[in-house]
Image (spheres, rainbow, N blue to C red):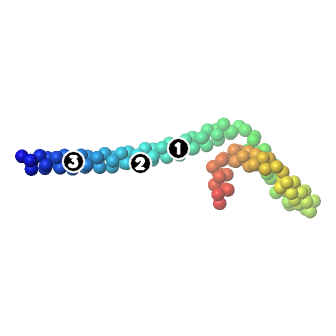
């Protein structure tokens, strides 16, 4: 009888241990699935955001205006010495501009052309 009780108790402990391991493995698997679902939702949200922004700005001249401004130094660089001088003086002036101003210009351009695209560009 005593031997049977000991075997039963050890068997109960072993069964409990194995059930606990199964539960841990199951919880770890569920956590991995939840993380993957969250990643998918985040990626979908980013895509949805880009699509929404593209749709909202399709009738806007903002991007064309910013592109035009960015093209001025390029165009002036091909107009001779006077154009190059104007471009260089402009860049020198911008180099002395307050950080808040140049950072604001970066944010405006990033917002116009896509924050993720700008982030990818600056990571290179």
* Mark in front: 2 vs 1: 2
Decide if residue 81 is on the left or right side of residue 118: right
**What crowding class fits label 3: few (fewer than 14 Cα within 10 Å), some (14-19), or many (20 or more)?**
few
Residue 105 at least partly seen: no
Which residue in the protein does label 3 denote? 13
Per the model, the C-alpha gap separating discs 3 and 2 is 29 Å
The location of residue 97, given as percent across then percent down, is: 84, 51
Q: Element at badge 3? A: helix
The location of residue 63, given as percent across then percent down, is: 73, 44
Give the mark nearer the N terminus: 3 vs 2: 3
* Mark in front: 3 vs 1: 3
Q: Which mark is residue 42?
A: 1
Q: Which mark is residue 8?
A: none
**What crowding class fits label 2: few (fewer than 14 Cα within 10 Å), some (14-19), or many (20 or more)?**
few
- Of residue 100 and residue 20, the one placed in the foreground of this image is 20
Identify which residue is drawn at 25% across, 49% down.
18
- Looking at the rendering, which quadrant does residue 73 occupy? bottom right
Quadrant in which the C terminus appears: bottom right
Decide if residue 35 is on the left or right side of residue 89: left
Per the model, the C-alpha gap separating discs 3 and 1 is 43 Å
Identify which residue is drawn at 13% across, 49% down.
6
Q: Residue 32 carries which label?
A: 2
């Amino acid at each position: 009888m005593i031997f049977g009780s000991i075997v039963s108790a050890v068997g109960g402990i072993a069964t409990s241990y194995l059930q606990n391991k199964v539960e841990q493995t199951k919880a770890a698997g569920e956590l991995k699935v939840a993380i993957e679902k969250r990643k998918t939702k985040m990626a979908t949200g980013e895509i949805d955001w880009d699509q929404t922004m593209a749709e909202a700005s399709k009738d806007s001249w903002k991007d064309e205006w910013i592109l035009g401004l960015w093209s001025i130094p390029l165009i002036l660089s091909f107009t001779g010495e006077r154009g190059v001088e104007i471009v260089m003086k402009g860049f020198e002036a911008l180099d002395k501009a307050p950080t808040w101003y140049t950072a604001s210009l970066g944010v405006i351009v990033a917002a116009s052309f896509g924050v993720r695209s700008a982030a990818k560009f600056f990571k290179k």
